[in-house]
Image (spheres, rainbow, N blue to C red):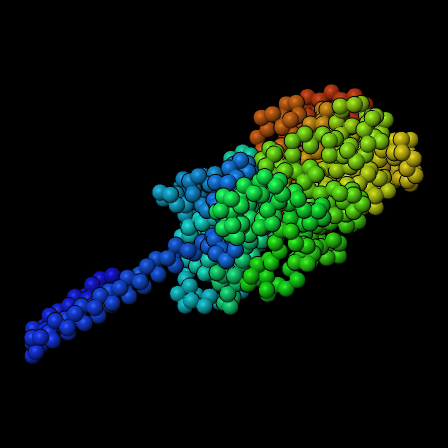
Amino acid sequence: MVGQWILILSALAGVSVLFLAHWPNPRSRWFVGAFLLVSVGSVWGWQRHLQLRLTSRTSVTTPLEGRREEFAGAAACRACHPDQYASWHRSYHRTMTQVASPESIRGKFDDVDLEFEGDKYHLERQGEEFWVEMVDPDWRIHQEKGIAATNATLARAAVAPRVRRRVSLVTGSHYMQAYWLDNQHGNQQLSLPFTYLFEGERWVPRPAVFVRDPAAKGWAQVWNLGCVDCHATAGQPGKLPGPTDFDTRAAEFGIACEACHGPAAEHVRLNADPRRRYQLHSAAKGDPSIVNPGRLDPKRSADVCGRCHSAHAPFDDEKWMAQGTQFRPGGELEKAFVVNRHMKSVEKRKALFWSDDMIRVSGREYNGLIKSPCYQKGDLTCLSCHSLHQSSPVYQVATNMESNAACLPCHQKLAANVPAHTHHAAGSTGSLCYNCHMPYTTYGLMKGLRSHQISSPSLKTTLQTGRPDACNLCHLDKTLAWTGQKLTEWYGAPAEELTPENQTVAASILWATKGDAGQRALLAWHMGWEPARAISGSGWFAPYLAVLLEDPYPPVRFMAARSLKLEPGFAKLDYDFVAPSARLHQASEAALATWWTEAKPADNPCLLLRSEDRLDRAALNNLLRARNNRIVELNE
């Protein structure tokens, strides 16, 4: 194309010279020459404009960062707020989404070959860029939908056409990373169907890190439709009229200052005047041109976090697809979103909630908070326990809040003698408020996470919902009958009618063998949770974790292997949780054989352990045959 323009410009220049040489009037020759020179220059300038425009188009196939209308960007905050900028910068909020670069990418891209459902992928790095050679995703989508390819060349192709796609964005920086590829539909970002796990430093198929239907095929995620809502600041999907095209933009990638404090362009402009800054500082008052969540009332403060940490849906899908959310910090969240509060609001298999409407998947802590009595009847808010700027970067738990400090100021009657309430020794894990009232009954990121709906242990609730109770998640070696007895003895809870199994077999074993995928996931993780291991005597976990090594759901297998490696004799366990089913079975049998050979358990009927032949295998097999095989999808 450049060569064609050179020929055109050369021809115009030649014609101009010949034309001027034969111009009859010497005086006007200079005016005509100047006109022709400007014309040639204009043609060259237009060509250059087109060339730059084409170049910019190819470079902005990544969603655009920066919205001009009311946002200033985090960099504008640094000069006046250096400490807050630094604490934000080291947080995982900042790295929710990053532009792909050698600094942001942790996955191995040095000539790596991967395979997913028969398709081969080649990953490579070229200078500062990362590339994937793969089957054309548009061709694959056509094939999967049974639609003939619209491109005649593709339709005639004997084999799947291959393309090269640039890695443009990265999400995740704590446990794993997902990668997004330019897809030539505006700035649509399509997911690479692999995740890089930091634990083990390896690639795995992306579906393997989620609790989803293990029989489901295919994987397609679009960053512009999902991640942009909560993994970017003020994201706008920018859906175009075409079926797949986008013009997506965000004020900033990741969760930046303005996600919590609101648009700051006006704030920056006003505070360019140092007199204003000094006056506000000396008056010790808030600045009305910006939002400080710590100065909001508890409900509006929680709404700031609920913007992302909730199960929600837009009121108007079409408007959201074009403009994104209109919520701004300081506003009322439920005037901008529909907050899903009930199990009925989603498909049953997509188990966002337990059957009593308690949220059960990560990232929706707001849904738990707003159902808590301490929020509904008191002043509890997210900032009661969390802080972005005075905390560790992992869970943003504020200084000294990994204790009872968040609870006792309101529950002062208990503060004088905590053990009298907990019936556990002072300073023990059983006397930490959140271990009983915020147990790990939420699942996400291939681990158990604390419920943020503050509640009390209830045997009735456990029987009705199947949600493991706090008592049996610490005392993994105890039955529900034991728990019921303690709750009655200590707190006057009414007795519940229990099945023979619930009276004689440890609850943890029943959930790990007969439970659904969500219950099995939580128990696989809890068998590696140090407080539970210390309390329950961990030497008996191995046979049950060995069984979970061939669970249908990959995350259950992953967590079972992680916990099993903590058991005596299994530190060097050689196991691949995404291996073919035959190898998974071999690994499970080998782990059982190892335990069978080395273990010397004492008789313990509730753990199915017998000193003579070590394990009641027949009873275990009966439990496994009764497993709840309903399809569960814990959509994080």
What residue is at 75 percent from the left and 23 percent from the top? 427
Q: Where is residue 351 in the image (x, y as percent from the top left)?
A: 71, 50
Viewer-nearest residue: 582 or 96: 96
What residue is at 21 percent from the left and 70 percent from the top? 39
Viewer-nearest residue: 616 or 601: 601
What residue is at 24 percent from the left and 68 percent from the top? 43
Dividing the picture into quarters, in which one does residue 382 lie?
Answer: top right
Viewer-nearest residue: 332 or 488: 332
**Residue 483 visible somewhere in the drawing:** yes
Q: How many marks?
A: 0
* Left or right: 464 in relation to 148: right
Viewer-nearest residue: 146 or 566: 566
**Residue 116 visible somewhere in the drawing:** no
What residue is at 7 percent from the left and 79 percent from the top? 24
Q: Where is residue 213 in the image (x, y as percent from the top left)?
A: 65, 50
Q: In this view, does 523 lie above or below 51?
A: above
Q: Where is residue 94 in the image (x, y as percent from the top left)?
A: 53, 42
Q: In this view, does 569 lie above or below 175?
A: above
* Left or right: 246 in relation to 558: left
Q: Which residue lies furthest to the bottom in this view?
A: 24
Q: Position of residue 555 (x, y in %)?
A: 63, 41
Q: In which quarter of the image is the N terminus?
A: bottom left
Dividing the picture into quarters, in which one does residue 401 lie?
Answer: top right
